[in-house]
Every structure is written in C-alpha cells, then in structure tokens.
Image (spheres, helix red, strand yellow):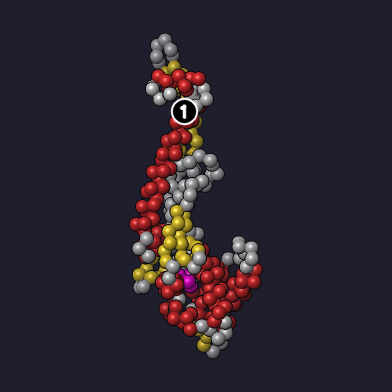
Amino acid sequence: MFILSYGITPLFVNQVIKQLSPSFKIHHEHLVIHHSPYPGEPGISVELTGNANKLLEWLGLDYDRWQRGFAAQADYQQWLAGMSQKADDWELDEKMRGSRIALGWARLVDQVTAIKDTAGHQKERIQKLEDFREWLRSIKYSELVKTPDHEEVTSNQATTELPVATHKRIVIRTEVTLDINLITGETTQEGSTTTIIQPHTEKTNKLTIHPRALDDYAIETLRYFGKLEAYERILAERRIEVEVKVENRKRKEQNREFGLDHDSKAARDVKRAEGRWI
C-alpha cells in the first residue's frame, strides 16, 4: 500500500483541488494555477509549488504520515479524509476542520455526476477514487465537515472566505440613427438601438480588452505561496499584447469599411500620399 499511495495520491489531490478552484491543477506533481483571461489567447500558468511537503501542508494533510506509508487501504483513506474511528462512530480530526482538503472532499461527495477519466487510461485509478467517494458518503462525511460557516477555510490559523460571485461585467452598446439635412446642417435623431454584450459568456471571435477575472480563492492561494506579484506582472504584459491586437483589428475593420483594405487601389493611394508605400 505504501507504493500505491505514491502513485494514486496525485490523482486524488488533483480531483479535490478542482473543487476549490477551476484554475488549480497538478502538473507533473507541481501545483499550478492556469488561467485564461483572454479567450483565444495563450493562458497564464504560474507554478505555486513543486514541494510535496508544502502542497500537503497547504491542503491540511500530514506529510510525515504519508512518508511512513500505510499498512492497509483503510489507513490510507482515513489519512486522506482526516478521519478517526471510535467504536462504531467516525470523527473528523480537529485539525482538519476548515481545511482545504476537507472542504474539497465534501464538495466532491455532494456531486452526483461520475468522475471522468480525462486522460483516457486511468480507469482503474478512477474506480479507486469512486470507491473512496462512496466510502465518504457511507460515513456521512459532508455532515461531519459542514458547520454554520461551511464555506470557511483556514490556513495556519488564518481564515479566508471562499469567493461568492457578486459582480458581472456587461457592456452596453447603443447605436443612434441621425438624419442630416445637407443644406441646413440640422440633424434629427430617428431612433436608437441598444445591444447588451456579455463578452465573458458569449462565444465570439472578437477579442476584448476586459479580462476574465481570476476567482478570489485562486488569488488568495497565489498570495499564500508568494506568487501574486508574478501573476499580476504576466497579466499586465498579456494585457498590453491584447490591446495592440485589438487596436490592429479595429484599424483593419475601419479600412475594410471604407474600402481601404490592403488589396484595394484606394488603400495603396492613401499609403503613397502618406509616404508609407514604397
């Protein structure tokens, strides 16, 4: 079981961290935040830690206990869930209350959908994870974990509230139709059309300079591992790149609208006049 725990633990951990934030993932035994602020553009990946001790400590698990190995499957499961059995009752270890691992397991237990084998070759390991989830359900794990402040997570005695969606970005575009009297110069507004655009939810090929926000839980984790500044620096660089692309696309659309695309004679005449055509 000692060897098995090394091989299967990353899979279990990867499943539980996905319950905390969709930006978390385990990549080659490294905890990584991957976020795509701009649809269609390369995402941002920041390695938080490649140290198993720090990763398990962040989750709330005992690294030294994991290193000693486990004599049986039941011992491994109890360590992974932070459970102790007393007589016929199960109890959640006090140090696990409010931990990330406990909250993640509780959320996974509450889900009714089957766990998917996204890699396509981990059927046996996925079944072990499903068996573990069924065991958690059998001991009513969610009820043991949940408290009046169920969405509370502690980190070395520090408390962090899990994110709640409170804002949604909506862009409103209004098009006004004007009737212009060419003789008098008077203008009359004939009507207006208002369009509501939701760039973060609608599928579109248009690039927007408004990034998708990283969830608060992921931001707090970046701060925990001292990587928030690195993430913000990459995001700022990516924003500059996107702004340039957006400006170039706008210019191309305007040129196309006025028949000044790069293949037209008018475009070549304009470039010659501006000294940009050789």
Quarter of the image where one finds residue 51 = bottom left
Rendered-image quadrant of the N terminus: bottom right
- Count of labels in the image: 1
Quick check: is 264 in the magenta stretch?
no
Amino acid type indicated by mark 1: Gln
Q: Helix or strand or loop: what does disc 1 sit on?
A: helix
Q: Residue furthest top?
A: 183
Q: Which residue is drawn at 44% across and 17% down?
A: 180
Give the extent of the magenta segment.
98-103
Q: In this view, does 100 lie above or below 278?
A: below
- State the image coordinates of residue 191 (x, y, percent, origin top left): 48, 26
Q: How crowded is mark 1: few (under 14 residues within 10 Å), some or many (20 or more)?
A: few
Q: Residue at x 47, y 26 (%)?
A: 255
Quick check: is 101 in the magenta stretch?
yes
Tell whether 155 sits left or right of 101: left
Can residue 66 be seen in this snapshot?
Answer: yes
Q: Residue furthest front?
A: 278
What residue sits right under mark 1 in the picture?
Answer: 254
